[in-house]
Image (spheres, helix red, strand yellow):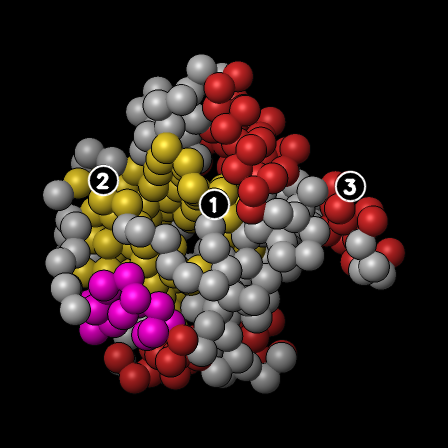
Amino acid sequence: MSTHSPKFGFTMLGSGSSGNASVIHGPEGNLLLDAGFSAAEMRRRMNQASVDSASIRAILITHAHNDHVNKCGCARFANELGIPAYLVPETAQDLQEKNINIPEKTMLFEPGSVFDLCGVHIESFRVSHDVAAVGFTFSTSAHKIGYATDLGFVSSLAKTRLGGCDLLILESNYDPKTLRASNRPLHLKRRIASNIGHLSNDDAMKALEELLAPNTKHLILAHISQQCNDCSLVACLAEARLAELHRQDVVFRTARRDAPLDTIRLED
């Protein structure tokens, strides 16, 4: 297995309601962003993506839902490597109330905190969800990555923080018509479509006009619902929207639930 790691880059290990995890490649080591799979599954996906699991120096958690913090996998993975997990106090409390183990080394931070890990400058910001949740930006002196999923709408704060990204990872969770026609309970449909739920395809495409910067070259549309969306639909919408915005220079991908995407290298 190749263990080459770019100085700065991103690997989406998987994204969807069944689990979310990504790797931020830094100049001084790698970071795991969310840990929504079992420890064995995260290692399997890293191996598939040619990422050495021993290179992970810390885990960053966006929020407490189990597709972002696997009940056993997150703590087991962190403890086996002896690495810390960074999360906001409300997330730690949510996990403890659900009797979910948190890693032995836990570092708490407030939404809006700024810190540096693995040679990467990290900024956190609150997003609108039905539990305490944060998005992140990761930057070096030359490049910036923005990550925001599980948000009911793109707030002015999120737009500000996500500005100027070379790579943007944005949720495109559901198709409104498919959600309405689904057999999900009405209260769940209302939650998903609310301002503390998830971002629809329509809202994600609309947001691109303000989020895509002149230097944006890569876009990943993530957390695509298996029941209430379709990757091919999201791809068609993205292609049409980028053409409408005259941004065919942006390479877009749709995140997969079942397998990693190829690593995006921003700086070698």
Q: Residue at x 52, y 37 (%)?
A: 235
Q: Position of residue 259 (x, y in %)?
A: 42, 62
* Left or right of residue 237, residue 14 in this image: left
Q: Amino acid at mark 1?
A: Thr
Q: Position of residue 147 (x, y in %)?
A: 43, 46
Give the vertical position of 216 relative to 116 (above or below).
Answer: above
- Point out the residue furthest to the right here: 186
Name the secondary structure under disc 3.
Answer: helix
* Left or right of residue 144, residue 205 in this image: right
Crowding near pointer 2: few (<14 within 10 Å), some, many (20+)? some
Q: Which badge, 1 or 2, comes first in the chain's sequence?
A: 1
Mark 1 and mark 2 residues within 8 Å of each other at the beta carbon:
no
Q: Which residue is mark 3?
A: 177
What stretch of residues is rendered in magenta? 42-57
Crowding near pointer 3: few (<14 within 10 Å), some, many (20+)? few
Q: Which badge, 1 or 3, comes first in the chain's sequence?
A: 3
**Which of 64/206 is in front?**
206
Q: CA distance from mark 1 to mark 3?
A: 20 Å
Q: Residue at x 30, y 84 (%)?
A: 80
Name the secondary structure under disc 1.
Answer: strand
Q: Residue at x 12, y 43 (%)?
A: 268
Q: Amino acid at mark 3?
A: Lys
Q: CA distance from mark 1 to mark 2?
A: 18 Å
Q: Nearer the viewer, mark 1 or mark 2?
A: 1
Q: Is residue 51 part of the magenta span, yes or no?
A: yes
For residue 254, the mark is 1
**Which of 82/167 is in front?**
167
Crowding near pointer 1: few (<14 within 10 Å), some, many (20+)? many
For residue 206, the mark is none
